[in-house]
């Protein structure tokens, strides 16, 4: 599920590059998340039914989604607008580190030698996967990307911890609703301040098609798979798979006519090895047989 989540998420990078030519990052992510929850709410009701949640649980889910997925998604898109998809994918290699730090702080993970070896392999694979590719200028864009990674990772862990009564679709929908509310508040404030928010050109049918792909596949489906994988693996192990994103982006770009980069293939292989090492559980020794002596 984590691998499929990253595969569908990767589709959004080249699509975003095309849409950002005419759309501001804030307006694009606001429309994207709004369309996503418009699709996810009826699917949630059909598959999982109407949940019985307290007002405290609803508020907590909305706040977590507003901060982690709303602000976090906007920061990620701003980072791509300031740099390029490769730079953002490279900085996403810090996600496993962020996940490990959050789980250690929460007391849900003990760092083992096996985990550290796997972590090192996945981070190294992420860097190798972007070696030799053109990269934009860092600076402010990199700062936005790092902040987005930590916010998204924190929210992914918090939603599984705070809303265990919901399934992956419910957790994703509730938190994305909070994200959409936060984004609309930010967009309204930006618009009232006189800044340009709306697209610079009339919306074309081609852009609508790109937006549907960007919303349905690269956000709605990807997020449900992601939340489900975090619930199964924990946020740190799930984040290891983020380092596969540059390889998936490369495959998409090759399909669109770009060149093949062997470093990304090598990096993806190293990421896969690291994931297997970190997920491999230590074999437990069989219990000792208790000998019962029968005395007359």
Image (cartoon, rainbow, N blue to C red):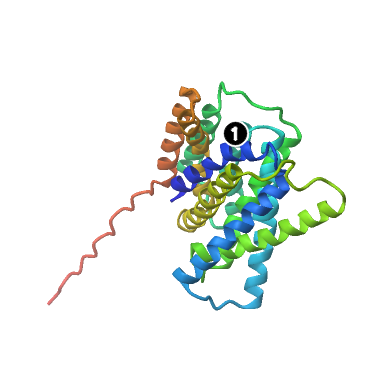
Q: Is residue 178 visible?
A: yes
**In the shown orientation, is residue 95 left or right of residue 141?**
left
Q: Which x, y percent locates residue 51?
A: 53, 75
The crowding category of the residue bearing disc 1, from other C-alpha atoms within 10 Å (few below 14, some 14 to 19, many at least 20), is: many
Residue tagged 1: 90
**In the shown orientation, is residue 126 left or right of residue 137?**
left
In the picture, the quarter occupied by the C terminus is bottom left
Q: Residue at x 41, y 41 (%)?
A: 277
Q: Is residue 106 visible?
A: no
Instruction: Please tell me in which quadrant of the rendered image residue 70 appears.
Output: bottom right
Q: Is residue 109 above or below residue 259?
A: below
Q: Residue at x 58, y 56 (%)?
A: 156
- Taking depth in this image into account, of 25 and 9 the one nearest to the observer is 25
Q: Which x, y percent locates residue 64?
A: 66, 61
Q: Which x, y percent locates residue 8?
A: 49, 45
Judged from the image, the secondary structure of the residue bearing numbered disc 1 is: helix
**In the shown orientation, is residue 200 left or right of residue 19?**
right
Residue lying at the far left in this picture: please name it. Answer: 296
Q: Is residue 293 above or below residue 97?
A: below
Q: Which x, y percent locates residue 190?
A: 82, 51
Q: How many numbered marks appear?
A: 1
- Taking depth in this image into account, of 105 and 35 the one nearest to the observer is 35
């Amino acid at each position: 599920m984590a691998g499929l989540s990253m595969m569908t998420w990767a589709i959004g990078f080249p699509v975003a590059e095309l849409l950002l030519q005419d759309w501001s990052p804030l307006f694009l992510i606001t429309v994207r998340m709004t369309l996503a929850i418009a699709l996810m709410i009826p699917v949630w009701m059909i598959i999982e039914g109407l949940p019985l949640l307290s007002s405290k649980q609803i508020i907590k889910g909305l706040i977590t989604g507003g901060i982690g997925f709303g602000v976090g998604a906007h920061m990620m898109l701003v980072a791509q607008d300031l740099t390029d998809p490769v730079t953002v994918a490279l900085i996403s290699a810090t996600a496993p580190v962020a996940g490990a730090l959050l789980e250690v702080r929460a007391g849900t993970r003990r760092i083992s030698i096996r985990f550290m070896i796997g972590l090192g392999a996945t981070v190294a694979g992420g860097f190798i996967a972007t070696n030799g590719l053109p990269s934009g200028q860092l600076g402010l864009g990199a700062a936005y990307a790092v902040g987005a990674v930590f916010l998204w990772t924190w929210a992914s862990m918090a939603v599984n911890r705070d809303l265990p009564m919901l399934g992956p679709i419910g957790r994703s929908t509730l938190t994305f609703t909070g994200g959409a509310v936060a984004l609309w508040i930010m967009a309204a404030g930006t618009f009232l301040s006189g800044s340009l928010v709306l697209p610079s050109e009339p919306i074309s049918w081609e852009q609508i098609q790109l937006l549907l792909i960007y919303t349905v596949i690269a956000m709605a489906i990807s997020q449900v798979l992601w939340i489900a994988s975090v619930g199964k693996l924990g946020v740190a192990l799930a984040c290891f798979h983020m380092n596969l994103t540059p390889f998936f982006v490369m495959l998409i770009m090759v399909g669109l006519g770009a060149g093949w980069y062997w470093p990304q293939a090598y990096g993806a292989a190293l990421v896969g090895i690291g994931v297997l090492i970190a997920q491999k559980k230590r074999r437990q020794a069989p219990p000792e047989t208790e000998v019962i002596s029968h005395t007359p």
